[in-house]
Image (spheres, coloured by chain):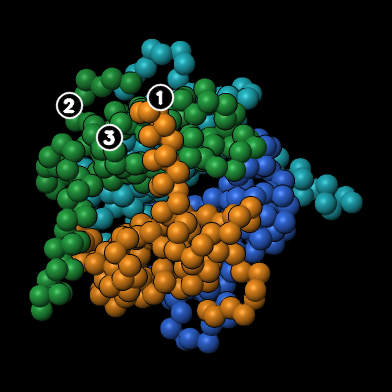
Chain colours: A green, B orange, C blue, D cyan
Amino acid sequence: MTDANSDELYAVADFCLIPMGTGAVSVAAEIAECQRILSNGYGTNIEGPWSAVSKAIHDCHAAVHAHGAPRIATDIRIGTRVDRETAPGTGNDHKVRRVQEILQQDNAA
Amino acid sequence: MTDANSDELYAVADFCLIPMGTGAVSVAAEIAECQRILSNGYGTNIEGPWSAVSKAIHDCHAAVHAHGAPRIATDIRIGTRVDRETAPGTGNDHKVRRVQEILQQDNAA
Amino acid sequence: MTDANSDELYAVADFCLIPMGTGAVSVAAEIAECQRILSNGYGTNIEGPWSAVSKAIHDCHAAVHAHGAPRIATDIRIGTRVDRETAPGTGNDHKVRRVQEILQQDNAA
Amino acid sequence: MTDANSDELYAVADFCLIPMGTGAVSVAAEIAECQRILSNGYGTNIEGPWSAVSKAIHDCHAAVHAHGAPRIATDIRIGTRVDRETAPGTGNDHKVRRVQEILQQDNAA
């Protein structure tokens, strides 16, 4: 899934992965498996070049299948923008910060 | 949207609300508007009786429409369970904690 | 979950329901259970007053829990708009038709 | 985004793409743009090797950005399974057919 195309979009995503058919009610073990792959401490938020983000989620699926789940359903929310540069690794943080700034203006007013 | 039905399910949810047709690229103002309604400091995580969770998201839509958005698209991830009681307000925390415990066992091993 | 509030928004939604912890790989039986409740032949598209849409999905959860699933995760995409009236039951159809019209103009050109 | 890895998972997906910051309320033009890329007549259902599915959605984003949207938010539901082979192009159809079979058994009973 490497991509030599310089026009690849930068993506900010979060995803929710649901193993199916395991008979286990808790999915904490499977989520932990994904966190080991992502190893960024931010749970299921992930960002980077689109194909890298996609590959990371694919590899979570592969890991959770290897962990015993015959079937997996994942919901991915993914965003791209071309109006400004997103400094690598700051997309999710930036969104949170902007909201906090607006709420602080409320308190100051 | 009150519900006298004692069989109503307890729901743990998170949602992502996208205002449309505003011509504004940033949605930070709209998200801040929702946070004022939810006022729980947990961003877009929300939990409680199903109808209360649903009503809170509905009221976010109403507030964001009042803020000028002619159209809104929201993605809601909502879960219910009947295998154990969820102590009020602990559903999202519990999920995060279980994953952390498993990862700590990794480090200890 | 009745709502006497005349300001309730009209919602157009579709949802994807995933039973968890059943040990069964196929979810066709559970989806069929939901279709019996919705009984509109449109799979998981649903529209109406917000609280009615929400209650229908809640009742699907209740039916699928009664069918044996200890836990359920659902993804709901729900939209509202205040720029024009949506004639009852036409929201999803309208969206499909608009796209088809645009594509037909392509072919005609 | 080509992938020489024979272990790539086969994915069945559907997605909902929301252009942001265009000032236009209708997204029919943008969806039509995506349909031109996907050209399969099935709206936003798509399936194939994971990286191909991902690339198709990426290319929809690129087309919609080129169409004038500064920002795009997409929700993707994507599933994989390792318990049986999915014949190419049949994943979504198979799911619908299984539900219909169960409902027909209802009617026959």
Do pointers 3 and 1 mark residues of a single chain?
no
Q: Residues within 10 Å of mark 2 (few under 14, many from 20)?
A: few
Q: Disc 2 residue type?
A: Ser
Instruction: State the image coordinates of residue B21 (x, y, percent, origin top left).
Output: 27, 64
Do pointers 2 and 1 mark residues of a single chain?
no
- Residue A87 lies left or right of residue C89; in this view the side is left
- Quadrant where the N terminus of chain C sits is bottom right
Relative to D22, does residue C8 appear above or below in the rendering?
Answer: below
- Give the number of the disc on residue A6: 2
Q: Disc 3 residue type?
A: Asn
Mark 3 and mark 2 lie on one chain; the one further toward the N terminus is 2
Residues under numbered marks 3 and 1 in contact, where contact means CB atoms less than 8 Å apart: no
Q: Comparing marks 3 and 2, which lies closer to the viewer? A: 3
Q: Return the residue nearer the eye: C68 or C14.
A: C68
Q: Which residue is mark 1?
A: B109
- Residue D62 lies left or right of residue B100; in this view the side is left
| Label 1: chain letter | B
Distance in Å between CA atoms under marks 3 and 2 = 25 Å
Is residue A100 visible in this depiction of the protein? Answer: yes
Q: Quadrant of residue B81?
A: bottom right
| Label 2: chain letter | A
Q: Quadrant of residue C79?
A: bottom left
Residue shown at 10%/75% (left/top)?
Answer: A108
SS for callout 3: loop
Q: Which residue is mark 3?
A: A40
Instruction: State the image coordinates of residue B26 (x, y, percent, origin top left).
Output: 19, 58
Q: Residues within 10 Å of mark 1 (few under 14, many from 20)?
A: few
Residue shown at 29%/52% (left/top)?
Answer: D19
Residue shown at 83%/47% (left/top)?
Answer: D105
